[in-house]
Amino acid sequence: MNGASPLPFGDVFFGWSWLDAIIRIVIVVLLMTVVVVYLTYGERKVVARIQQRLGPNRVGPWGLLQGFADAIKLLIKEDIRPRAADRWVFEFAPFLTFIPVLMVLAALPFARDWGVRNVTLGLLFVNAALGLNIVGIMMAGLGSGNKYALLGGVRAAAQMISYEIPLVISILCVAMVAGTLDLNAIAILQEDRPFLLLQPLAFVIFFTAMLSELHRAPFDIPVAESEIVGGYFVEYSGIRWSMFQLTEYASLWAFSIFGSVVFLGGWEFPMGSDWGWGWQLFLTFVKSLAWIIAVMWVRTTVPRLRIDQLMSFCWKVLLPMSLVQLLMNGFILVYDWPQELLTLTSGIGAAALVGFVLYRTARHPSVAHLVGSYKRAGAAAQ
Amino acid sequence: MGGAIVATEILWWIFAAGIVGAALGVVFSGSVIHSAIFLILSLAGVGAMYLFLMVEFLALVQFLIYGGAVTVLILLALMLTRMGAGEKVNGAQAPVAFMVAVALGAILLSVAVRTAWPGDTGDMPHNIAIEAVSEKLFLDFGAPFVIASVLLLVALIGAIVLARQEDGE
């Protein structure tokens, strides 16, 4: 982004602007590494608590050094490449999955003037980078020379392409309300109320589609261990496997900060501008932590969807709901109706969506349009 | 700002070399998967070129549509048709394809040579606000935009009709 971003964040701290950009991105990447190490530890700990286990508790006090031990173990493991693999496709795939996440991190505001660069088209930039996310995964699936990897790649591609549409539309709804694509400006606009209050339906859709983009349960079909032994990274080991792990947790972190800026008020709400950067960083930290714990909570609570359920949920439920939200926003904003109406309509929509999901869960399962083993399994369950 | 200008120029040459190299890779790699991946690289490089021209919106759209959608579609089609890495790409149609490619190349080159390009990009519009773009697109050119959307919608419905499995098939 050198020379192209219109405004650096605040001043150029470190000499020339290109040197400044490099130093800032290095700081963010180092921070990301520590965050990822503790996210792996934190996820195991949180999931263990929910499942009434203890989790890692041997390495260091309360197992706090477990993540570092795992990282060292992964780095010194042998790097195996299957003979049937397409060599360069196989070897570059983990790194190509990581690049989009790095691009997203470069545009995120951690606090006012704290970030790599302030991109005026921040929302669009994040979406464009996320669109490239699929390429690395498909390369891994195609290059591994393994049927399970190929299946995982196809599943991941189909799922991510589908869920990207409601994701983008839900972000677009917020952009309509905010009237800007600049992430910092969006945070500032949420001075007295987070956009979560104005756009609950968009928030629900965003959160669901985000789980799918991250391959998190209940949408972890591309990496389902019990079905396709791990999906597109089944052939990877050692440092390349850890690159996939790093990407997964780094994108969870990036998504949590992005989501908290767009929906929860980011570093601004409440009192962000008044109480200085320490409070702003604290707000970002707390909000992203809450976001991540919610993701883990969903993961431990909801069982995995079937592939046809996944697709029909996206195309028949999430996409129409997000379009409804977009239309409602259009009417309300064009005619300058009061903001409370946004809250009301979107709240009704969110309640309808959640209610529909709960109703479908509680209802007796139908096997009308299922084929093969699914039908037999469904009939047996009845 | 001298350092920044030099750095931009160096980066420009790196990206230019990358685009040309990746484009050559598309043609000469000999494997469809490799070609598709080189195509992504080349198109992303073109997106970076837009950044050097200070047209950010176009650059991001380039990444989003060509990098994220078109090439992913190619890769998905490759996956579904099980086009292996060792598949031969030169078939019986190679001579015809060669002639078409040469003709197209000649046309493109002659157009590129004959056009009177503005020598300096300095007076070109750049860093246009997104609001201005949307006003042009949705107000001044509203009708073509709607017609293009209808075309895409028709294509979408057509694809669904073609792909739809009737019961009992």
Image (spheres, grey):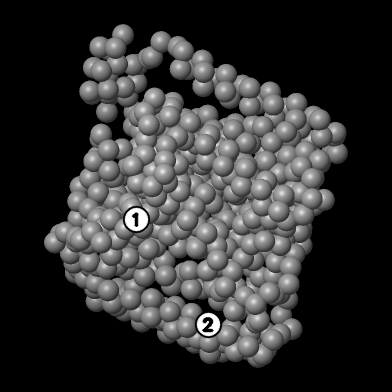
Q: Residues within 10 Å of mark 1 (few under 14, many from 20)?
A: some
Q: Which residue occupies the foreground of this view, B166 or A107?
A: A107
Mark 1 residue type: Ala
Q: Which residue occupies the foreground of this view, A30 or A194?
A: A30
**Quarter of the image where one finds residue B83:** bottom left
Query: Dot 1 lies on which element?
Result: helix
Which of label 2 and label 1 is nearer to you?
1
Q: Where is residue A80 drawn, in percent x and y?
A: 19, 60
Residue assigned mark 1: A71
Mark 2 residue type: Leu
User: In the displayed structure, does residue A264 sit left or right of residue A369?
Assistant: right
Query: Dot 2 lies on which element?
Result: helix
The chain to which mark 2 is attached is B
Residue A328 can be seen, yes or no: no
Q: Where is residue A113 drawn, in percent x and y?
A: 71, 62
Residue B151 can be seen, yes or no: yes
User: In the displayed structure, does residue B162 sit left or right of residue B143?
Assistant: left
Q: Where is residue A161 drawn, in percent x and y?
A: 45, 46
